Amino acid sequence: MREMDHEIRLPTLLFFQNGNGWKGSSGLLCFSVLPAQEERLPVEVWCGPFCRELSQVDDRREFPLSAQGLAELKAWLEDWSRRMEAHPTHTPEETRAWRDRVKAEQAAAKE
């Protein structure tokens, strides 16, 4: 198994308490921390390289909006990054096919 290529960086708790979201990546892992809802931080993870809108979400989870919750969130993302680097959830072909399908659906909806 390769060592993690990138450190996962998250803003401070105050950043999330002020209603902000955050997106980031680490190797193949991409993630989005959505703005807090009812004192919970919703998070989505997917296999890169494409943006969330063009990718298949692999997992969703919520963490408490607290210092402990933020630490648990970071540990969960680090675990996902290690696992995804060792065994990607989707092949590059599957990832491109998903993106192409979403783009085709978006184009059809505009017509």
Image (cartoon, helix red, strand yellow):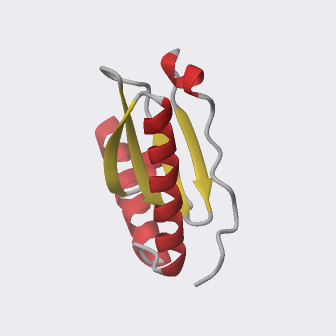
Coordinates of residue 32 in the picture (x, y in percent): 48, 42
* Image mark count: 0
Asked whether, in this view, residue 93 is left or right of residue 15, the answer is left
Residue 9 appears in view: yes
Quadrant containing the N terminus is bottom right
Quadrant containing the C terminus is top left
- When the figure is inspected, residue 32 is found, relative to residue 93, above or below; the finding is above
Coordinates of residue 94 in the picture (x, y in percent): 40, 73
Residue drawn at x 53%, y 70% as measured from the top left? 82
101 or 94: which is nearer to us? 94
Q: Hey, which residue is sitting farthest top in the picture?
A: 18
Residue drawn at x 48%, y 71% as measured from the top left? 84
Residue drawn at x 65%, y 45% as measured from the top left? 9
Q: Hey, which residue is sitting farthest bottom in the picture?
A: 1
Coordinates of residue 70 in the picture (x, y in percent): 49, 38
48 or 34: which is nearer to us? 34
- When the figure is inspected, residue 42 is found, relative to residue 6, above or below; the finding is above
Residue drawn at x 50%, y 54% as measured from the top left? 75
Q: Would you identify the image quadrant in which residue 76 lies?
A: bottom left
85 or 71: which is nearer to us? 71
- When the figure is inspected, residue 39 is found, relative to residue 26, above or below; the finding is above
Q: Hey, which residue is sitting farthest front in the picture?
A: 68
Asked whether, in this view, residue 76 is left or right of residue 29, the answer is left
- When the figure is inspected, residue 99 is found, relative to residue 34, above or below; the finding is below
Residue 105 appears in view: no
96 or 41: which is nearer to us? 41
